Image (cartoon, rainbow, N blue to C red):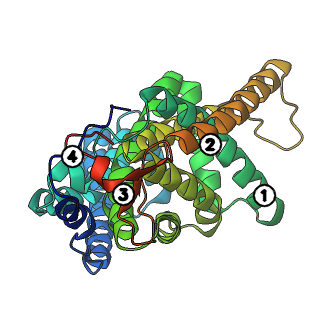
Amino acid sequence: MDTLTPNPLPAPLIGELLHQKETPRVWPIPLMLIASLACYLFASAGAVIIAAIAVKGRLDPSMLRDEAFVQSLMQSRVGFPLIVFIPQFAMIIPVLIGANLSPQGFRERLNLVRGRWPIWIWFTAAIATPLIGMISSAIVGSFMEESEMLVEMTKVFRDLANGGFLIPLAVLIGATPGICEELLFRGYVQSRLTSRWSGGIGILLTSIVFAAFHMDLVHSTAVFALGVWLGWICWQSGSIFPAMLAHFVNNSLSVLAVSVAPEKETDEVSLAVAAIMLTVLMLSAGAFLITVGSAWRYRQPTYLPNGSDNLASETGDVLPLESISPSTKA
């Protein structure tokens, strides 16, 4: 933390600059979500058409009504990336337009800033994320059966992985939602909600919407905890970048895990796979403890509700407002 220098401005003026901020409006959020969902659904249909032309070289409307044909597109190295990437990118077009029109500034509006955390905590948070996914999946799997959509997606992942497309698949499934979904949910939605209300309320509401956007009851239930964790990372760090990295690591490892997992409940897990899974679990648990402890050390400044015009520093110390200069970095 930078050394605090005497404040050349009168304390009342600094207090006014820090406390009197325009209350963010929340009514644009539902409109943004509706626009993003509409773009996603429209682009999903268009992506199938584009993939059909790219894979088959032609388009017959009757082909699109054949489930086996659509499934073949999903299992194609060309068709699957198109079907994944195009809707995800279309989903954030309204977000990019809205952030560009915001008087707050594009990067600030989407939380594309450096934040408070050192970069090494970004990586510990990312390594900790699979632990959240494992626990959530285990709990949900204990009382809910795997949905048909997840079964089909698992089969697609295995087919592509067995065809030598494992690493590109893991990167695609990690990077595309890791960037696009985070820009929409943690970048646009949560940043507005946490500025208007408390961090807990903003994270909870965003996580509910994030889960609902997966449009599958089992999948939505499983990813709710992940949304809370990603929201907490973004809120505590003051930046969307750690959440993007954590989302990427979680999705990429999920693809790898699904690809090497037994196809049937009766199949045995190989010793090598079991050792890798245990190592990932132990590393993730250790990283989780480090992340939580480090987040307390670098927690965000908070105003004290005692009317004393004091501000809590990034280390949690209470700083008199008169000692904070405009050039002090958070």
x then y, percent, for residue 193: 38, 70
Please tell me which residue is depicted at 34% across the width and 49% down the height of the picture. 180
Q: CA distance from mark 4 to mark 2?
A: 33 Å
Please tell me which residue is depicted at 28% across the width and 45% down the height of the picture. 112
Q: Nearer the viewer, residue 128 or 157?
A: 128
x then y, percent, for residue 109: 23, 56
Q: Which residue is mark 4?
A: 7
Q: Earlier in the sequence, mark 2 or mark 3?
A: 3
Viewer-side label of 2, 1: 2
Mark 4: few/some/many CA within 10 Å (<14, 14-19, 20+): some
Q: Earlier in the sequence, mark 3 or mark 1?
A: 3
Vertical placement of 116 versus 83: above or below?
Answer: above
Q: CA distance from mark 3 to mark 1?
A: 40 Å
* Corner quadrant of residue 187: bottom left
Q: Which residue is mark 1?
A: 139
Q: Which mark is residue 40?
A: none
Q: Earlier in the sequence, mark 2 or mark 1?
A: 1
Q: Which mark is residue 63?
A: 3
Local secondary structure at mark 4: loop
Q: Which residue is mark 2?
A: 292
